[in-house]
Image: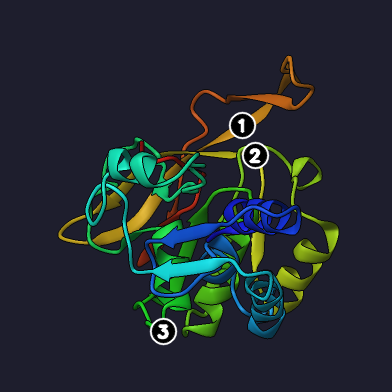
Amino acid sequence: AGPAGLAAAHDLAAVGFEVEILEAFDEPGGMLLYGIPEFRLPRDVVQKEIDGILRLGVILKTGVKVGRDVSLEELLERHDAVMIAAGCYTALEAGVEGEDLPGVLSGLDFVIEVNSGGRPKVGKKTVVLGAGFTAFDCARLALRLGAEDVQICLRRTEADLQVTADEVEEAKNEGVKIRGLTISNRIIGSGRVEGVEFSRTRPAGLRPDGRRRVEAIPDSEFVLAADTVIVAIGHGTEP
């Protein structure tokens, strides 16, 4: 019952199909509800959209996880077709030393926990690794949870960001600092996170997709002190 599943259910029901949605979470909406903070997407907007879809006769069952509560084979026996729109809920890892230290958080899990009513603990100095919407959401949420110094560290430059200009401006207005042309080498700490070692980067031409390529500058290492590191470099599927 995320964006893709809801959209498909709407279009299919509108032309006469009987549609049933199975949702693993307790509430429908998927990333609209759990993956985006309320300050960026008000919950009443999401609920109105969902209510409009359900009024078409779509059946919604929440708290049902395929593979745990029902098998794909059972669904295929009971239905003419099955569409898999399970979303991307597996957070990618940075793959650097120290990522398993206490105080290092997954960006996607961090946002989901907040949107589920939790209040994950963040330190006064928070470093966010990533350059997408989730990274900016994490930075703004960290401020709301009590962090005093929040920095988003980018491999490229601020001009290369693919988030909207409004998002960047709002984050800055709230106090988020953006540090470009850096790449993380390792997360430092004894018992828990104490900082991140970075190398400075420089532009190195363009990639085939047109985005800027960067390379680490030799002997340019420096350390940013941090008591919380949020890794928000993307997410993938859980096959």
Q: Residue at x 40, y 50 (%)?
A: 196
Q: CA distance from mark 1 to mark 2?
A: 5 Å
- Kindly indicate the quadrant of the structure image that contains residue 9: bottom right
Give the amino acid type for the residue marked by disc 1 in the picture: Thr
**Is 165 on the left or on the right of 13, as rendered?**
right
Nearer to us of marks 3 and 2 is 3
Q: Earlier in the sequence, mark 1 or mark 2?
A: 2
Give the amino acid type for the residue marked by disc 3 in the picture: Gly
**Is 210 on the left or on the right of 30, as rendered?**
right
Q: Residue at x 34, y 68 (%)?
A: 63
Q: Which residue is mark 3?
A: 117
Q: Position of residue 202 (x, y in %)?
A: 68, 28
Q: Residue at x 29, y 50 (%)?
A: 188
- Circle 2: is it few (<14), some (14-19), or many (20+) Cα within 10 Å? many
Q: Is residue 10 visible?
A: yes
Q: CA distance from mark 3 to mark 1?
A: 38 Å
Q: Is residue 106 above or below residue 43?
A: above
| Residue found at the very far right of the displayed protein | 165
State the colouring used for the structure image. Answer: rainbow
Give the amino acid type for the residue marked by disc 2 in the picture: Leu
Q: Is residue 199 above or below residue 144?
A: above
Tell me the quadrant of the picture where the C terminus can be found: top left
- Circle 3: is it few (<14), some (14-19), or many (20+) Cα within 10 Å? few
Q: Position of residue 206 (x, y in %)?
A: 76, 18
Disc 3 is placed on an element classified as: loop
The answer to which of 44 and 216 lies nearer the viewer is 44
Point out which mark residue 181 bears: 2
Q: Position of residue 221 (x, y in %)?
A: 47, 37
The answer to which of 183 and 144 lies nearer the viewer is 144
Point out which mark residue 201 bears: 1
Q: CA distance from mark 3 to mark 2?
A: 35 Å
- Circle 1: is it few (<14), some (14-19), or many (20+) Cα within 10 Å? many
